[in-house]
Amino acid sequence: MSLKMQKKNRNRIILLGLMLVFVFSTTSTVLGGSYTTHEEIPGQGGVTNDFPTFLKMLYNFSIGIVAILAIIMVGVGAFTYIVTSAGNASKMADGKEMIYSALFGLAIALIAYITLFLINPDLISGTIESVSTIPQYIDPDHAP
């Protein structure tokens, strides 16, 4: 490995380390309860000080954006396939690819939603409470 590649890899490792330090240093602050949003997420109604509520609002907003973008890209792909191609097989293939990619992205978003719903419906609705502790079972036959 050349000296230039070693420096490049070292720089990447340093950058990755700095990013991880930043992420872990901010995570404790966010999860510690001192989180306050300053901007409202469009369509979600207000500012929140609760991090799980913020995640729920961000998730709902993201699903809406994915659906809107998928519809737009299907339309663009159909326009490319029908109008712009003018019989050009290459342009027709590009239009088909746009439509398939948009539908694939929409399917991934739907699968993510269904998976979260199957794991726990409260993950989608945002009504999940803090996790309660499980009482410890003491076997009477092996009690100290």
Image (cartoon, grey):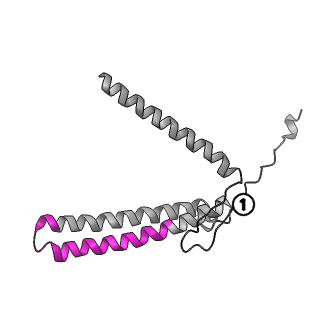
Q: Is residue 112 above or below residue 85?
A: above
Q: Which residues are magenta?
A: 62-91
Q: Is residue 32 above or below residue 86?
A: above
Check disc 1 and report its element: helix, strand or loop.
Answer: loop
Q: Is residue 2 visible?
A: yes
User: Residue 14: horizontal and vertical position, in percent?
Assistant: 47, 32
Q: Nearer the viewer, residue 82 or 57?
A: 57
Q: Is residue 123 visible?
A: no
User: Residue 123: horizontal and vertical position, in percent?
Assistant: 61, 62
Residue at the right extreme?
144
Magenta: predominant secondary structure element? helix
Task: From the viewer's perspective, tell me whether residue 34 is left or right of residue 100.
Answer: right
**Residue placed at 85% from the left, 34% from the top?**
142
Residue highlighted by disc 1: 129
Q: Which part of the image, by quadrant, shows the C terminus?
A: top right
Q: Is residue 133 above or below residue 100?
A: above
Q: Amino acid at mark 1?
A: Glu
Task: From the viewer's perspective, tell me whether residue 135 is left or right of residue 61.
Answer: right
Q: Nearer the viewer, residue 133 or 72?
A: 72
Q: Is residue 69 magenta?
A: yes
Task: From the viewer's perspective, tell me whether residue 7 is left or right of residue 22.
Answer: left
Q: Which part of the image, by quadrant, shows the N terminus?
A: top left
**Residue placed at 82% from the left, 44% from the top?**
137
Picture quadrant of residue 139: top right
**Residue placed at 66% from the left, 59% from the top?**
36
Picture quadrant of residue 40: bottom right
User: Residue 122: horizontal and vertical position, in percent?
Assistant: 64, 64
Q: Is residue 81 magenta?
A: yes
Q: Nearer the viewer, residue 93 or 59?
A: 59
